[in-house]
Image (cartoon, helix red, strand yellow):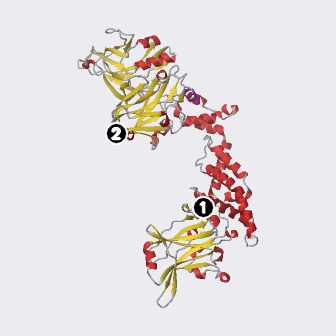
Amino acid sequence: MKKKGFKLLALAVITACCFGISAVSAFAADGETKTAMNGASIRTNEPNGLRFEAVVDEATYYSVIEDDGKSFGAFILPKDYLTNANITEITDHKEQFVAPTVEKYLEKEDIEGESQGSDYVLKYSIAQLHYYNYNRVFVGMFFIKTVGADNAVSYQYFTVNEANNERSVAFVAKAAIENGSDVPDPAYDFAIAAKYLEVNGYDSTEAEDAQKSEADAFVTANKEGFKTAYAAIKAAADIETINILDESQKPKIQAARKAYDEADPVIKDLLDDFAIYDKFVANETAYQEAEAAGLVETVNNAIAALPEYNASTVPVVYNKNYKTAKVAYDSLTEEQKAQITDYAKLQEYEAAAAKVKLIYEEDSYAIYSNTDTKFNVGTPDEESFIISIEGIPEELSEYGFISKVWANDAARNVRLGFKNLPDLTGYDVVRFPIYLSPDQVGANSYNLVYKFENESLTGGYRKLTAGWNIVTIPVSKMYEGIVIGANMIPAKTILHYAIPYAEKLENGDKISTFAYETHIANSTITSFTDAYRANVSFDKVQTDEGNILKVVTSTGSGGAGENYAFRMNDYEEYQTIVADSGATGVEFKIYKNGTGGRVALYVTEDTSGHDKGIKEITLQNDGWVTVSLTAEEFARWNGYFRRTWGAGTELYVADFTIVK
């Protein structure tokens, strides 16, 4: 009997001699008909057989075996012996057999159960199955027999239904294969042999030995081919949503079609029996229809779905949607490319992508395999410092493959030492994205620290805060490796590292972005007292410029006209980046918010006197000023801004950009 699209009800199991399937059934209340078919299994050793099982709850089991007048029993017989083909409607099994063959069934009484947890399993088998009966459906029925005081016999039958009580060798074998978890090899033998016998019409004892030999030879010749075809079809069937921009889908569908078309006709017929074949065909049809609908339209939609390019958002090197759209666009013919309506948007992404590359191959172990864990507090054992690639939060998936690092036992200096660096010739900076969960750190910030080979520790003035922090390092300092992390991170507070990426800097590109980095610190000029230093806020401020900036506020007690100063922390690394990149200059913006009218602010060098500097910046209330420095001027800068402004005045400092 051919059962297209059957579904396995539970897991396939295998023992030393047999494999099978089971079906979970609920038990009826005591005193009612019991529903307890557990399934069936095939004996793989000679002689072959089909075993049926039923599960009985402990209370019911002991109520029977402790009563001298009661016992468990079972029937096994071909389904075609029943007068009522709908076995669910059977009420008195003994009266449902076809009269001429009433004696042709197996029956056993006094069946003892095997303990299984809090239940008991009853088992009954039909052995020495003829080869031609592999496709014949057998029905297993269990009952409780009661012999009364007057020797009157009555039967209480377990509830029967097709799902739990009907089994054939072919069905059990195919169900074990479809389960897909550690499939026993004999399952393939029985399934293929049964299909071969079905297709060739072998249904009697005539020439059984010759038929068996013929079927066995067919199994030997075609088993591996069936496994290959089944695996290919399953891979295509497992595609959840058809997307012609997903370059992995078409090869799977093509491989499945090729494997099926090259299979023997009997193997094709067997593959047809599995639900995955229908799903594969549906996916194949959907893919072909999607292609026929027009790849041009799909690419146009993919580009339209991309947001306008903004360098301050997720870096393009991680953007999976861009990568998918780019691959699809590149697959178009020149005629099709001419039909793309917003190629300019894609070009912005392409231009950005051409300037960046991940420093490690894009896989889950990229960071894990190319870093060393580092401590600078005490000598903790290895268990106190943990690096893992498991359990990465879903919200970080846009940054690709992440590794998480934390101290397990106490607050520590948690750092990673990056090694195995590639050749970065042609690139100017390396950016290290590090994420701290807002749920773990709240409004707290931690000192970012890093060191290069053979150099002392740098840092303590830049801060890691909740969310993404992108740390920019000059390429010229990277070749000997870098250790990067944070000081005294609380126990179990995780630093999430994305794969670092290298970037070429061109005219108008940001050296680093205030959207992710804190660069501004209090002045350290010794001639200024604490009262005269700027109060630096690390809050991020959204402005009309569309950037997120850092704020410097004057809070001196002397009121208007007092001297203040503030410093850019990593100006020396900025200078290295500008020099290495061959830039001709640097631009940045400053915004004054507050009262006091015109303010003169000086970009200073070490020799600058009072009210002197490399360049004077004239600031007005509520207005942006663009400051331009030549490369030579920028190289002389000592990192300070100095001058006089009124108490309560705020300054916003925007991103430094390259001029070429």
Q: Which residues are magenta?
A: 346-352
Instruction: Pinpoint residue 28: horizontal percent, then vertical percent.
Output: 47, 72
Q: Which residue is under mark 1?
A: 175
Q: Quadrant of residue 205?
A: bottom right
Camera-side residue of 195 and 214: 214
Mark before the other along the chain sequence, 2 or 1: 1
Q: Is residue 201 visible to the viewer in this orientation of the structure?
A: no
Q: Main secondary structure of the magenta part?
A: helix
Camera-side residue of 100 and 422: 422
Query: Which amino acid type is shown beneath numbered disc 1?
Result: Ala
Whether 227 is among the magenta residues is no
Q: Secondary structure at mark 2?
A: loop
* Residue that appears at 27% across and 13% down: 527
**Which circle marks residue 135 in the picture?**
none
* Residue that appears at 28% across and 19% down: 533
Instruction: Pinpoint residue 633: horizontal percent, then vertical percent.
Output: 43, 11
Whether 350 is among the magenta residues is yes
* Residue that appears at 66% across and 32% down: 337
Q: Quadrant of residue 13?
A: bottom right
Inter-mark Cα distance, 2 to 1: 50 Å
The extreme bottom residue here reads 150
Q: Secondary structure at mark 1?
A: helix
Is 256 drawn above or below residue 618 in the view shown?
below
**Crowding near pointer 2: few (<14 within 10 Å), some, many (20+)?**
some
The extreme left residue here reads 557
Q: Which residue is under mark 2?
A: 491
Is 641 drawn above or below residue 409 in the view shown?
above
Query: Which amino acid type is shown beneath numbered disc 2?
Result: Ala
